[in-house]
Amino acid sequence: MGTLLAVLLAAAALAAAYVLFLRPWTVAWGATEEEQVRSMPGDDLVDRPLLGATRAVTVAAPPGEVWPWIVQIGQGRGGFYSYTWLANGLLRLGIRNAERVHPEWQELRLGDVIRLAPEGRRPPPIPVRRVEPDRFLVLGDRSPDAATSWCFGLYPVAGGTRLVFRTRDRWSLGPGGLFWMALSEVGSFFMVRKMLAGVRERVERDGRSRSSSRPA
């Protein structure tokens, strides 16, 4: 009994430490206070989200150079610029991250879908809800039991672009729901942080390559 109590107290202490100290950083990684509270397209798709995060990076390029990399995301398209060893080795999602802009993947329309996994596999694809070139790409879906939204926002700033990515999720909590919620949140943090850094790396590398190829 004493051992069980000690384990429960330790688990409670770890959970409290995560909620109070670590979670505020992970769900707002890279984002300013203004970016965290600012409304973004797609917020209305998920009311009362269980999970929500706003993360951001600064890219040293204008929005028009960032957008082509965002609009081509997806399984079977440009990938997600994140950890393929996890997506493919553990989850077998068949993700390939593009290293260049592909002209054939530059068109998205309302009603198109972005696949997260091979066709017929879970997780299901996410419908395109809003496309504003060089400004916003919104993906999202909702049902009585679950809802999700992704918004990529491109905001011009001095010296480049603030790439802000917001996610909002709601679903029914069943047995083990809190555990899976925490696991999803932590996993999302690592994958999204790598994705944003991956976009930045590719855009800035592409810009350097173009600059070096120009005649002196």
Image (cartoon, helix red, strand yellow):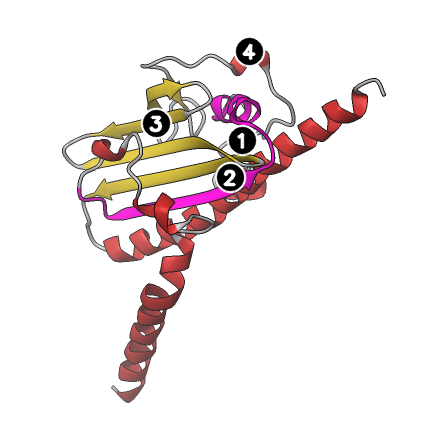
N-terminal of the pair, mark 3 or mark 2, is: 2
Q: Residue at x 26, y 35 (%)?
A: 43
The CA distance from mark 3 to mark 1 is 18 Å
Q: Secondary structure at mark 1?
A: loop
- Find residue 83 and report its image quarter: top right
The CA distance from mark 4 to mark 1 is 17 Å
The CA distance from mark 2 to mark 4 is 24 Å
Q: Are marks 2 and 1 in contact (CB under 8 Å)?
A: yes
- Image spot of residue 97 (x, y percent): 59, 30
Which amino acid lies under the numbered mark 4 shown in the image of this protein? Glu
The CA distance from mark 4 to mark 3 is 20 Å
Please tell me the numbered disc located at residue 69: none
Q: Are marks 3 and 1 in contact (CB under 8 Å)?
A: no
Residue sitting at the far front: 158
N-terminal of the pair, mark 4 or mark 3, is: 4
Q: Secondary structure at mark 2?
A: helix
Q: Residue at x 22, y 44 (%)?
A: 49
Q: Which residue is mark 3?
A: 139
N-terminal of the pair, mark 4 or mark 1, is: 1
The CA distance from mark 2 to mark 1 is 7 Å
N-terminal of the pair, mark 3 or mark 1, is: 1
Which amino acid lies under the numbered mark 2 shown in the image of this protein? Ala
Q: Which residue is mark 2?
A: 87
- Image spot of residue 105 (x, y percent): 52, 15
- Image spot of residue 157 (x, y percent): 50, 35
Q: Are marks 4 and 1 in contact (CB under 8 Å)?
A: no
| Residue 131 within the magenta-colored segment of the rendering | no
Q: Secondary structure at mark 4?
A: helix
Please tell me the numbered disc located at residue 104: 4
